[in-house]
Image (cartoon, helix red, strand yellow):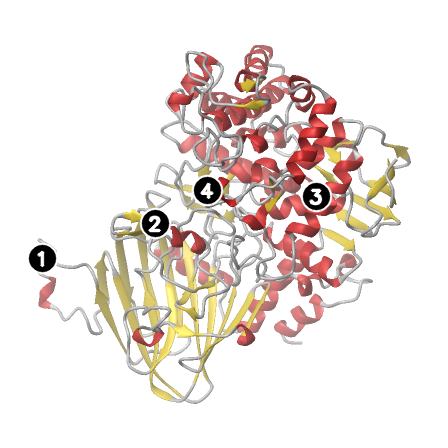
Amino acid sequence: MKKSLRILVGLFLPLVTMAQQKPLVQYVKPIIGTAKMGHTFPGATVPFGAVQLSPDTDTIPYAVNGRYNGDVYKYCAGYQYADPTIVGFSHTHFSGTGHSDLGDFLIMPTVGKVQMNPGTATAPETGYRSRFSHEEEQADANYYKVKLQDYNVLAELTTSERVGFHKYTFPKSDQSHIILDLMSGIYNYDGKNVWTVVRVVNDTLITGYKQTHGWARTKTVYFAMRFSKPFKKYGTQKNDGKQVYQGFWRKFDQANNFPDQAGHNLRMHFDFETQDQEEIQIKFALSPVSMRNALANMEEEVPGWDFNEVKLAGQQKWNDELNKIQVQLPAIEDYVNFYTAMYHAALMPTVYMDRNGEYKGLDQEVHKAEGFTNYTSFSLWDTFRAFHPYMNLIDPKRNADMVASMMAHYDQSVLKMLPIWSHYANDNWCMSGYHSVSVIADAIIKGVYTGDAEAALAACVQTANKRDYEGIGAYIDYGFVPDENSGTSVSNTLEYAYDDWCIAQLAKKLGKQDVYDTFIKRSENWKNLYDERIGFMRPKSKDGVFREKFDVLDTHGQGFIEGNTWNFSLYVPHDPVGMMNNMGGEKRLVRYLDSLFTMHLPDEFFEHTEDITREGIIGNYVHGNEPSHHVAYLYNITKQPWKTQEKVRMIMKNQYHNGADGLGGNDDCGQMSAWYIFSSLGFYPVSPASDEYWIGSPAVQAATMNLGNGKTLRITAKNQSDKNVYVKKVSLNGKEITNFILKHDDLVKGGDLVFEMAAKHK
């Protein structure tokens, strides 16, 4: 039996074989989130793969006339569903972010006269881009296909972990081309490309690298590119402008068939003669270390030219990933939402090392990962909330490796700080807090990370005491970040306080009483910015005076990052009861939450905050951005926990759909999706670094969680329906849960979690 056939048969074996696997990839719809605010990409990748091979639909620059161009925000993942053209297919993409980089090594097949610029969406014929139709587009797990209408070329994409595999079916032509655009990039601007090198080794093999200065200040990616067919000739366009020093390379004709290229801005074309329906395939491998390693990655992962075999092998990896949770749901649409959420929650972080274990570290030196897989692209302001706790349950080994990657980052940092938002051997310092401490503490407390816990605690303490970073010194001195020190002083204070609580919990586990005492006191700093006169958190000067001109609805310029005080005043996940008492007690909290979900927030209050749009708002509750993701669960500490059940189910229906615009906000590297997964299963980690999950209302009828420790947790929701959203009773292994809290140690033992649902609350 051919290997590709064996993979195909294995993918769809019945339940009695393959350890009860189900063919779940059929429910993955990568197109979800590619319209409006989702910022996901539709292209091919494997779980946590280093290559994300996907179409880019425009070339919007980061700046126009030296000023930020707001339209670029729509292209954080390179693709917008509403666009009519495809510029090409690049190999690196973020999923769901609200800022961007990457889009490296764009490839585009063309027919006819060679065009060496991308053209425009309104006049695609002026460049190498092409029109396309969604009716001739297909996006599946690890497979993307589209007809490029201007060239009558069928493009198909798949991947292994480090290799992008292209297949282009051409018409008959003596002017068929492959464009390699090394200038192209996401969030591009003049000067972003620091240097590019290309070596044409022979008529089928190209190697090189590209260094950029963008969100990652010193990002270098190496590549090896191999064609299935020799090209007839090739050419290079260098777009560097006039330079003062030219050297003596002018002795060569560098534009035509010249194999040794270097410059800031390069585009190349490779020319072929094709018969009708002839396929030209390309394998494109990446490496963070060297061209040699990129080629080795290719030879080890994709030694042959069987496109279907690589596609099916990647889809089997996806099936393995999705089968970690098997669910029963009432409708196909629900299966699509759930398994696409699992898919989106397995795109990032990404593997950042070669097959031989080598990777480039934060110190720009080459390191070798010993005993762990090294990862990059940690969007920690988002993912500490639910994504990493989700990993601790279904894939603890992977999350342990992610923590080890963070510790390697710290060890290589001359600043001696854990990652804030890191990618490609850089920290880009985006967003606030030092939330790696939450991920690390949670993993150690739950027994997931078994590395040096003492060293991890020391790294957490060192990071939290970095006085010259974003107001930490003032925070330590005053007990809050003063208004004059930061435009996001309140949200910084609230996030630091939570992170300090995480450090305290880790210190407590390790018996470090002095560290615990220091940081548990710091964790109460949230109280210092609560203005009891108005009932909200509010910016305060170092003199102790609250800001006079203050708008409780505005999400811009009021002391908060991407939110208003209505949402952020509830951000005390580590002490929700203390927060409730501080704001006036249970009745006040219930009224507050009720108002949050039912009031109307006019557009004028978020029109200057690009990460918040109408689609992600319910009342004044902003689900489309992360700081409020725990809020619906806060009714659990009142006498009206049924409102948590009601709200959670409402949010799932309101914010998650099957269409291209099926996400109400940026998926943010899987955090929006992880919220959906947890909430669908009936519980949520309100405060990571505790051992608690708060009960909500399961949307599944039943689920089997194959926990990473070999145990199985079976979830049953009796009488679950769209009307029966209220939890009448819940029990774990026969023991009734009356406080709406599940303990981590109890869950990971496996067994049966049973919900009894009803149409009316108690």
**Front of the two marks 2 and 4:** 4
Q: Which residue is nearer to you in this view: 260 or 110?
A: 110
Residue type, mark 2 in image: Thr
> What residue is shown with label 4?
609
Q: Quadrant of the C terminus?
A: top right
* Circle 2 crowding by C-alpha within 10 Å: few under 14, some 14–19, many from 20: many
> What residue is shown with label 2?
220
Residue type, mark 4 in image: Thr
> What residue is shown with label 1?
247
Disc 2 versus disc 4: distance between alpha carbons?
Answer: 31 Å
Q: Quadrant of the N terminus?
A: bottom right
**Front of the two marks 3 and 4:** 4
Disc 4 versus disc 1: distance between alpha carbons?
Answer: 48 Å
Q: Which of the two discs, 4 and 1, labels the residue nearer the N terminus?
A: 1
Residue type, mark 3 in image: Phe
Residue type, mark 1 in image: Gly
Q: Which residue is nearer to you in this view: 443 or 110?
A: 110
Judged from the image, the secondary structure of the residue bearing numbered disc 2 is strand
**Residue 729 to residue 476: above or below:** below
* Circle 3 crowding by C-alpha within 10 Å: few under 14, some 14–19, many from 20: many
Q: Which of the two discs, 3 and 1, labels the residue nearer the N terminus?
A: 1
Q: Which of the two discs, 2 and 1, labels the residue nearer the N terminus?
A: 2
Disc 2 versus disc 1: distance between alpha carbons?
Answer: 25 Å
**Front of the two marks 3 and 1:** 3
**Residue 349 to residue 486: above or below:** below
Judged from the image, the secondary structure of the residue bearing numbered disc 4 is loop
Q: Which of the two discs, 3 and 2, labels the residue nearer the N terminus?
A: 2
Q: Which of the two discs, 3 and 4, labels the residue nearer the N terminus?
A: 4
> What residue is shown with label 3?
678
